Image: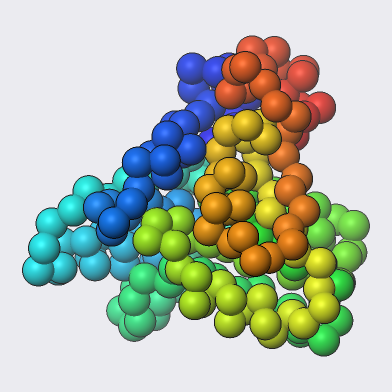
Amino acid sequence: GYEGQGPEHSSAKPERFLQLAAEYNMVVANPTTPANIFHLLRRQVTWEFRKPCIVFSPKSLLRHPSVVSPINEFTKGGFKEVIDDPTSPKSVKRLIMCTGKIYYDLVEARQKKKIKDIAIVRVEQLYPFPEKQLNAIIKKYKGAQLVWAQEEPSNMGYQSFIIRMMPEQKIEFISRKASASPATGYAKVHKVEQ
């Protein structure tokens, strides 16, 4: 995650893992709730077969006040590959898709600005890509502008993978500008970019 600690501490290079992902050879996930991490790991060990599971999770979410799950979410259900927004689809003009920590930044900005016409959907599993689940959610928000938001520069992160996985969708991409480095080494610049 982007936490202002410079390039060596700011990117797990998700684009590289996603370039290697093919023929169901691995699972790539970026879970955002404690319960979903639990269900992801439980699913991994209960499968009858073994395959690598790559999990992206920044340290800043460890003690984030919004990153909590009620006990019943641990005891019921399973891993959610996509998590929809509770906003009523009728009022939504823009559907923002994202993965990981940026979700909490987007929700905070939406609350601060009192925005009611934006839904934020979390893609918790990137590979195998949850195409059916995501398309079902997109269908609910008929006519909404589709956006993919990421913290990484446009030449890194998830953007090229999303283009490859969703070629039929017209998606606007919001990211940092293309860069040779995954993150700035200056705290002031990081705060401005964030």
Q: Pinpoint residue 70: horizontal percent, then vertical percent.
A: 45, 73
The residue nearer to you, when weighing 103 against 28, is 28
**In which quadrant of the rendered view does residue 92 lie?**
bottom right
State whether residue 1 appears in this view.
Answer: yes
Q: Can you say which quadrant of the picture contains the C terminus? A: top right
Looking at the image, which residue sits at the far left? Answer: 48
Would residue 23 be found to the left or right of residue 180 on screen? Answer: left
Is residue 34 shown to the viewer in this render? no
Q: Residue at x 85, y 56 (%)?
A: 112
- Left or right of residue 153: residue 60: left
Left or right of 74: which side holds 139?
A: right
Q: Is residue 140 above or below residue 41?
A: below
Point out the image quarter for the N terminus. Answer: top right
Which residue is farthest front? Answer: 168
Closer-to-camera residue (149/73) = 149
| 183 up-or-down from 163: above or below | above
On screen, residue 139 above or below 125: below
Instruction: From the viewer's perspective, tell me whether residue 159 is left or right of residue 133.
Output: right
Question: Which residue does the image show at 22% across and 48% down from the upper left?
Answer: 52
Q: How is the image coloured?
A: rainbow
**Residue 171, percent from left and from top:** 73, 58
Residue at 62% x, 17% y: name it: 180
Q: Total label count?
A: 0
Q: Nearer the viewer, residue 82 or 110?
A: 82
Provide residue 128's location: percent of width, then percent of height. 37, 61
Viewer-closest of 104 and 154 = 154
- Image point 40% across, 76% down: which residue? 73
Q: Position of residue 179 (x, y in %)?
A: 67, 21
Where is 59 relative to 133, above or below? above
Q: Quadrant of residue 182?
A: top right
